[in-house]
Image: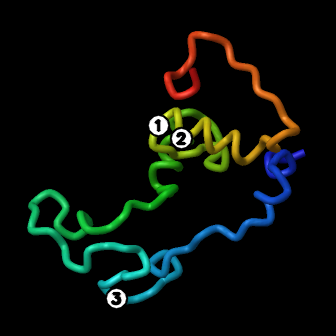
Amino acid sequence: MSIEDLARANVRALTPYQSARRLGGKGDVWLNANEFPTAVAFQLTAQTMNRYPEPQPKAVIESYARYADVKPEQVLVSRGADEGIELLIRAFCEPGKDALLYCPPTYGMYS
């Protein structure tokens, strides 16, 4: 059994979003990504301050997988514990069918 077998059927059927840049598109203006077309005059990262970061950055995932001694497929990058928990619930729990048990103390978002 794989982790994919545990996911909701409608989640397994989804087609993941792929940006034009990720698909190998060319150019500097990405209107479909709602990004500012020119780089901000800023020393630190002048070429990337006007772009969204990768949602699942490969280098971060591979580095963390090596650190934690797990497979890269077992790593989920999120913007914090709240988002990670929410993504897992949305992927694996059927509304009206599955139940969750949480024990205090808990995160503020769920209390």
The numbered mark, 1 or 3, whose residue comes first in the sequence reads: 3
59 is higher (above) or lower (below) than 79: below
Alpha carbon separation for disc pair 1 and 3: 32 Å
Q: Callout 3: helix, strand or loop?
A: loop
| Residue position marked by numbered label 3 in the rendering | 27
- Asked if the residues shown at circle 1 and circle 2 are in contact, with their CB atoms under 8 angstroms apart, the answer is yes
Q: What residue type is labelled 2?
A: Glu
| Residue position marked by numbered label 2 in the rendering | 83
Q: Callout 1: helix, strand or loop?
A: loop
Alpha carbon separation for disc pair 1 and 2: 6 Å
Residue 61 in the image, given as x and y percentages of width and height = 52, 49
Residue 84 in the image, given as x and y percentages of width and height = 57, 39
Label of residue 80 in the image: 1
Residue positioned 70% across, 70% down in the render: 15
Label of residue 19 in the image: none
Residue 88 in the image, given as x and y percentages of width and height = 67, 41
Give the mark toward the camera: 2 or 3. Answer: 2
Q: Callout 2: helix, strand or loop?
A: helix
Q: Is residue 106 left or right of residue 50?
A: right
Q: Which residue lies furthest to the top in this view?
A: 104
Residue positioned 61% across, 35% down in the render: 85
37 is higher (above) or lower (below) than 74: below
Q: Which amino acid does label 3 sit on?
A: Gly
Residue 5 in the image, given as x and y percentages of width and height = 87, 50
- Asked if the residues shown at circle 1 and circle 3 are in contact, with their CB atoms under 8 angstroms apart, the answer is no
Q: Which amino acid does label 1 sit on?
A: Gly
Give the mark toward the camera: 1 or 3. Answer: 1
Residue positioned 77% across, 43% down in the render: 92
